[in-house]
Image (cartoon, rainbow, N blue to C red):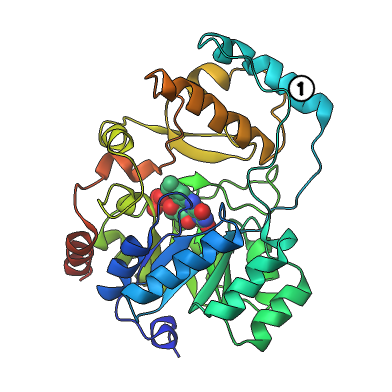
Amino acid sequence: MSLLTQLGIRYPIFLAPMAGVTTPLLASQVSEAGGLGALGLGACDAFQAEAAIRATQQLTSQPFQVNFFCHRSTPLDPVKSRAWCEYLSAHFTQFGQAVPTQLLAPYASFTDAPELLEVILATRPAVVSFHFGLPPKFILQALQHAKIPYWVSVTRLSEALYAQQQGCSAIIAQGVEAGGHRATFDPLCDAGLSTEELLQQLAPHISLPIISAGGVMTGGQITQLLTQGASAAQLGTAFIACRESAVSDQLRQRLFTANGTQITDVISGRPARGVMGRWQLEIDRPLRPAHADYPYSYALAKQLDKVASAQGVTDYQVCWAGTGVTALRPLDAIPLMQTLIAELN
Ligand SMILES: Cc1cc2nc3c(=O)[nH]c(=O)nc-3n(C[C@H](O)[C@H](O)[C@H](O)COP(=O)(O)O)c2cc1C
């Protein structure tokens, strides 16, 4: 049975789950238009995750995907984090603020938050997907037992083979063009394969449906990936600027005027692609100290943005986006879906 038939949807156009960007309205609009909506819930606690899922279920009876981060959590390394805070201290003092001395993880890994599993079992979304790896076996068994399919993003063949062995019902193959965090299970181990290269490497070895992600902005590109063996494409950047997303007008403006993106690990502590700004140009310098681990670095980045934004300086704001950002179209979700569908053939 094809992936679309399994899901009961019409079009191979999936909204990428994007923490802090996707909303119940955006997810439901994509699902209502015949694609697969998504909620990025990686930065949510159980209360927020349940509220978002239930709000989406109120807006659509069509299926949608919910997504969580599955990073291996590490205790704070005090020496590394102190050095990183010191390195960033001048950026804080220019706004008359002292650099924080304590970094707290801004959210938990799905693996460490059993209450998130409870939310999934209670709300029964059509699919749950994971970024940065899979949770341990007992959680996967609970999902299997509840007949809730699960997917994981992969960036290389070895991760895809592991996903297949762990009972995933599809895999999301994320190419290096993708906006946001690289999905690599190990942040230090990135093959850097493009979306097309990755699909070509996976297709002969993987019997599961493959959902290609990374740099896809048009229906023509989706068709091209389908002819190369993908079952669907997952688009993030293409949907960020939709009015139904959670991004501010200021960030939307930055996306439309962006002239390039770069991967850096200085913002969150894991490699992620975003629009060029102060983080990429001034902070990610050669010979800088090692950043604090993920997600402790992210806590510091968010605090710096808060301090700067309070004084009207917005260029510390994190602006995740893929290489396709320069082809971004100023369309709301439904017209964008209609355009992508029309371009499919
Ligand atoms: C702003 C933004 C936030 C993202 N957040 C998540 C997330 O929370 N979970 C996830 O699995 N992927 C996340 N991603 C990655 C997407 O799932 C997907 O791999 C990527 O958007 C595809 O590339 P594209 O942006 O070029 O379409 C994010 C991407 C962007 C652009």
- Mark 1: give few (<14), some (14-19) or many (20+) Cα within 10 Å: some
Q: Position of residue 119 (x, y in %)?
A: 59, 72
Left or right? Give the position of 46 relative to 341. Answer: right
Left or right? Give the position of 168 relative to 337. Answer: right
Q: Residue at x 55, y 14 (%)?
A: 91
How many numbered dots are placed on residues in this image? 1
**To which residue does mark 1 refer?**
82
Q: Is mark 1 on a helix, strand or loop?
A: helix
Q: Where is residue 258 in the image (x, y as percent from the top left)?
A: 31, 31
Q: Which residue is drawn at 58% across and 79% down?
A: 122
Q: Which residue is drawn at 41% across and 44% down?
A: 322
**Residue 44 visible from this viewpoint:** yes
Q: Where is residue 133 in the image (x, y as percent from the top left)?
A: 67, 60
Q: Which residue is drawn at 36% across and 32% down?
A: 260
Q: Does the residue labelled 1 lie within 8 Å of ligand 1?
A: no
Instruction: Tell me the quarter of the image containing the C terminus.
Output: bottom left
Q: In this view, does 108 lie above or below 252?
A: below
**Residue 198 visible from this viewpoint:** no
Q: Where is residue 206 in the image (x, y as percent from the top left)?
A: 59, 74
Q: Is residue 194 above or below residue 164?
A: above
Left or right? Give the position of 296 relative to 80. Answer: left
